[in-house]
Image (cartoon, rainbow, N blue to C red):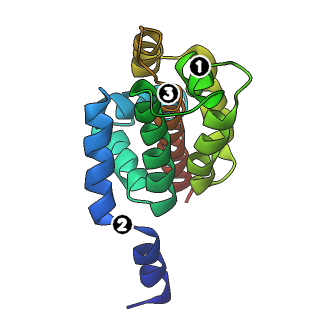
Amino acid sequence: MSQHKSEENRLNDIKKYDIVVKRLQERGVELKDIAELTLGLQRQYLPNLEYEDALEHVKKVIMKREVQNAALTGIELDCLAEKGLLSEPLSSMLLNDYGLYGVDEVLALAIVNVYGSIGFTNFGYIDKLKPGIIGEIDKKGKEEGKCHTFLDDIIGAIAAAAASSIAHRFAE
Ligand SMILES: [Ca+2]
């Protein structure tokens, strides 16, 4: 096995990949929704990019251990907040998606960082415009007893990282 290959394997985790995909589905997010965001981000640069390509890169991002860890942590905190298992002041900050909390965005940067700095611009763009599934998640998160404080940033970050992964490949 080459040095490069063993490095890839060290950073990938197939077992946890399945768990992350399942948890996302439980929270109302399908990989195809994330692929749509990625496609939207890349459309102006790569108008011929296919949906399947975008989906492939979304899957590649979720194979990364640091992405899985960030996603699992954020989703868990949203769920604990919904179940009323967090203590104050954290509980109210998460349930009300308090604007100055900021740790949701910081956690998402662990995902954005996986493919370098191009991801930041993409992530900022999604965070501002809230396209597709991000807008839906945001709206549902405002319902009584619902918490999507971390979920929107995790999804946006995965889509942004996938767009960066595509940009890297086409730059080669
Ligand atoms: Ca958020």
Q: Which mark is residue 38?
A: none
Task: Give 158 or 146, whichever is nearer the viewer.
Answer: 146
State how many labels appear. Answer: 3
Among numbered discs 3 and 1, the one appearing first in the sequence = 1
Number of other residues with Cα within 10 Å of mark 2, as a class: few under 14, some 14 to 19, many 20 or more: some
Asked if the residue at tag 3 contacts the one at tag 2, i.e. Cβ–Cβ closer than 8 Å, the answer is no
Q: Quadrant of residue 75?
A: top left
In the structure shown, which secondary structural element does the residue marked by tag 3 occupy?
helix
- Cβ(mark 3) to ligand 1 < 8 Å? yes
Report the side of 154 relative to 107 (left or right).
left
Secondary element type, mark 1 = loop
Q: Gap in Å between the C-alphas at discs 2 and 3?
A: 23 Å
Q: Quadrant of ligand 1?
A: top right
User: Amino acid type of disc 1?
Assistant: Asp
Sequence-first tag of 2 and 1: 2
In the image, taking residue 15 as reference, residue 108 lies left or right, namely: right
Q: Position of residue 27 (x, y in %)?
A: 32, 30
State the mark number for residue 152: 3
Numbered circle sitting on residue 97: 1
CA distance separating discs 3 and 1: 11 Å
